[in-house]
Image (spheres, rainbow, N blue to C red):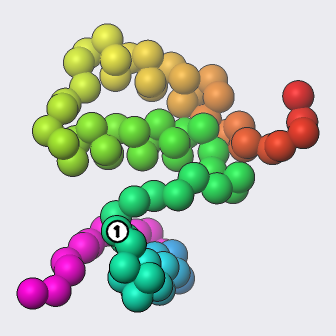
Amino acid sequence: MGIASQKTFHLKSAAEEWARNAEHSIDRETDPSIHKISHKDTFASLIDLHIEDLGAVGKPLRRSQEAVLRRLKDDLGDTLDRPGKA
């Protein structure tokens, strides 16, 4: 039995990169569904990842959580993690 995984992308190039990374993970016998956080990730993308992870384990956001996360995305969404910058 093989490993099945899927994700939707807006760009074909992003989908191809994801597929390559998933195949490399499988070759290294690691779980391809584990997202490694990179310094290229914006705060908004990390919030989206958190929401996606909660959905994957069947924990929907409560209204107050959703409002807080939406506000954080609006205020800090474009912020990148840049080591050494304060």
Residue range (magenta): 1-11
Report the predominant secondary structure element of the magenta stretch.
loop
Is residue 85 visible in this depiction of the protein?
yes
Q: Is residue 42 above or below residue 73?
A: below
Residue 13 percent across, percent down from the top left: 53, 82
Q: Quadrant of the C terminus?
A: top right
Q: Which residue ends up furthest to the front in the rendered image?
A: 29
Q: Quadrant of the N terminus?
A: bottom left
Secondary structure beneath dot 1 equals loop
Q: Is residue 21 above or below residue 32?
A: below
Residue 26 percent across, percent down from the top left: 36, 82
Is residue 12 visible in this depiction of the protein?
no
Q: Identify the residue shown where x is 25% and y is 15%.
A: 63
Q: Is residue 48 or residue 86 the one in the foreground?
A: 86
Q: Is residue 20 or residue 30 the one in the foreground?
A: 30
Horizontal relation, residue 45 to residue 29: left or right: right
What amino acid is labelled 1 in the image? Asp
Query: Hey, which quadrant is residue 35 in on the image?
Result: bottom left
| Residue behind mark 1 | 31
Classify 10 Å Cα crowding around label 1: few (below 14), some (14-19), many (20 and above).
few
Q: Identify the residue shown where x is 48% and y is 79%.
A: 21
Residue 45 percent across, percent down from the top left: 52, 46
Horizontal relation, residue 58 to residue 28: left or right: left
Horizontal relation, residue 61 to residue 77: left or right: left
Q: Identify the residue shown where x is 63% and y is 23%.
A: 75
Q: Is residue 49 above or below residue 65?
A: below
Is residue 6 on the magenta stretch? yes
- Total labels drawn: 1
Is residue 12 on the magenta stretch? no
Query: Hey, which quadrant is residue 57 in on the image?
Result: top left
Q: Which residue ends up furthest to the left in the rendered image?
A: 1
Q: Identify the residue shown where x is 18% and y is 32%.
A: 59
